[in-house]
Image (cartoon, grey):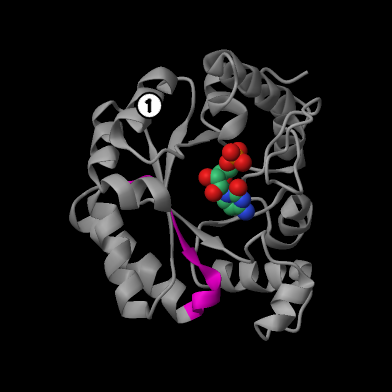
Amino acid sequence: MKNISIESAISKLIFALDADNYEEALSWVQLLSGHVGMFKVGKELYTAVGPKIIESIKDIGQKVFLDLKFHDIPNTVARAAKAAVRLNVDMFNVHASGGSQMVKEAVTAAWNCADEIAGERPIILAVTVLTSLNNTDLAEIGFPRTTGDQVLHLARLAQNAGASGVVASAQDIEMLRANLGNKFIIVTPGIRSAGSIKKDDQKRTLSACEAIKKGADYIVVGRPISTASKPLDACQQIVQEIADGLAAR
Ligand code: C5P
């Protein structure tokens, strides 16, 4: 049995800070600091409160995943990537379907900016196919491949364009690991514990332990913690599941 430190398990847990106001978001950060590895700031929170929540999280000494899924012309995405680096985020993402030029320019701009300000280079993830889309939806927007084939196609494109990794559903972890190697980072949302009946709107779920065992580098968890009667206990339970998954790898 491998000896897994609790810190290494904590570092793999990203809490989805899905709140619509600064005070609620900050109270989650205060409660969970040190118990999760990173806080994910998405479109709702960022649109509602702006960069000050990122500054507050960083001031407390915690890490930030800015989940704004940039998708625009390469010049605009490169400039947004630079702005994300200046905010000192540890991870952000772009849509791979923006094309390899867009991904390349985002990576180059982000890394040049980090080097200029002597900051850390952030992890840059690509989003492949939104998990809300099925084969019929892809056909409707003119993509002939199945979702699985399109996920791999776009993940390869992102890897070749210099992205650090992808956001991937639980069902794609093994396929991506097998095709893209061990260094490409896989971040997986849609985590529900094995015994949980409540899946919310997540269709393809996996437990934290299984996702880590299959090869996810990070998992994103929101409601299983935020709607639990004892959120900190739920969080610690998930960290234990991650440790079990790491031990079973
Ligand atoms: O509450 P829950 O654990 O389902 O939260 C998951 C988080 O991950 C949300 O912030 C959601 O937007 C995000 N996400 C997802 N599925 C994806 C990509 C991101 O649930 N395919």
Q: Nearer the viewer, residue 119 or 58?
A: 58
Q: Which of 162 and 127 is in front in this view?
A: 127
Q: Which of 163 and 147 is in front in this view?
A: 147
Residue 81 placement: quadrant: bottom left
Kind of residue sitting beneath label 1: Val
Is residue 37 highlighted in magenta?
no
Is residue 92 highlighted in magenta?
yes
Q: Is 42 positioned to the left or the right of 26 in the image? A: right
| Residue 186 appearing in the image | no
- The quadrant of the rendering that contains the N terminus is top right
Q: Which residue is drawn at 68% across and 40% down?
A: 200
Q: Which residue is drawn at 37% across and 74% down?
A: 105
Give how far across and how far down residue 123 sits, in percent: 44, 51
Q: Which residue is drawn at 28% across and 54% down?
A: 85
Residue placed under numbered mark 1 in the picture: 29
Q: How crowded is mark 1: few (under 14 residues within 10 Å), some or many (20 or more)?
A: many
| Residue 115 appearing in the image | yes
In the rendered view, tell whether residue 200 sits above or below residue 194.
below
In the rendered view, tell whether residue 10 sits above or below residue 122.
above
Q: Nearer the viewer, residue 58 or 100?
A: 58
Q: Is 54 positioned to the left or the right of 64 in the image? A: left
Give how far across and how far down residue 60 sits, in percent: 28, 26
Give how far across and how far down residue 239 sits, in percent: 61, 22
Give how far across and how far down residue 93 sits, in percent: 46, 58
In the rendered view, tell whether residue 188 sits above or below residue 68.
above
User: What range is drawn magenta here?
Assistant: 89-100
| Residue at the extreme left of the image, as rendered | 117
Q: Is 209 positioned to the left or the right of 14 in the image? A: right
Mark 1: secondary structure:
helix
- The quadrant of the rendering that contains the C terminus is top right
Looking at the rendered structure, the number of numbered marks drawn on it comes to 1
